Image: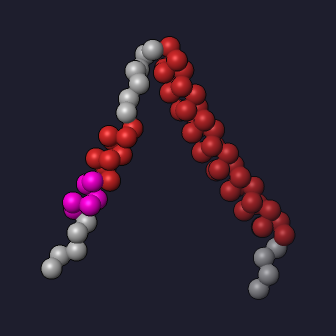
């Protein structure tokens, strides 16, 4: 059964509204984060050690049981 064109356009419109809100929220958080880094409110941090530790937790805990 074919979907009516009006229903399809309504679904596209609602999907776009949801995605645009999500994108707007992400950009707002990124802007605040960048502003805080520039002003010195928060200092630099090392993502390498954080990601290494995070990845290591999967290696340690995700071993298959024998």
Q: Quadrant of the N terminus?
A: bottom right
Residue with the most extreme top position: 39
Q: Quadrant of residue 44?
A: top left
Which colouring convention does the figure follow? Answer: secondary structure
Determine the residue positioned at 17% across, 76% down: 65
57 sits left or right of 3 in the view: left
Q: Is residue 35 above or below residue 25?
A: above
Q: Which residue is drawn at the image coordinates 58% and 38% (left, top)?
A: 25
Q: Is residue 58 above or below residue 48?
A: below
Kindly report the secondary structure that dominates the magenta region of the rendered protein.
helix
Q: Is residue 2 above or below residue 20?
A: below
Q: Could you tell me residue 43's position as x and y percent?
A: 40, 21
Q: Is residue 13 left or right of residue 42?
A: right
| 64 within the magenta span | no
Question: In this rendering, would 57 be left or right of 34?
Answer: left
Span shown in magenta: 56-61
Q: Nearer the viewer, residue 64 or 9?
A: 64
Taking 38 as reference, is 45 above or below it?
below
Residue at point 64% right, 50% down?
18
Q: Quarter holding the C terminus?
A: bottom left
**Picture coordinates of residue 17 (x, y %)?**
69, 49
Residue at screen point 78% across, 67% down:
8
Number of numbered discs on residues: 0
Q: Position of residue 36 (x, y in %)?
A: 49, 20
Residue 58: within the magenta? Answer: yes
Quarter of image, res 21:
top right
The answer to which image quadrant residue 14 occupies is bottom right
């Amino acid at each position: 059964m074919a979907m009516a064109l009006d229903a399809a356009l309504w679904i596209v419109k609602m999907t776009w509204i949801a995605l645009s809100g999500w994108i707007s929220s992400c950009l707002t958080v990124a802007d605040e984060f960048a502003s805080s880094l520039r002003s010195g409110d928060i200092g630099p941090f090392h993502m390498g050690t954080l990601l290494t530790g995070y990845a290591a937790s999967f290696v340690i805990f995700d071993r298959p049981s024998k």
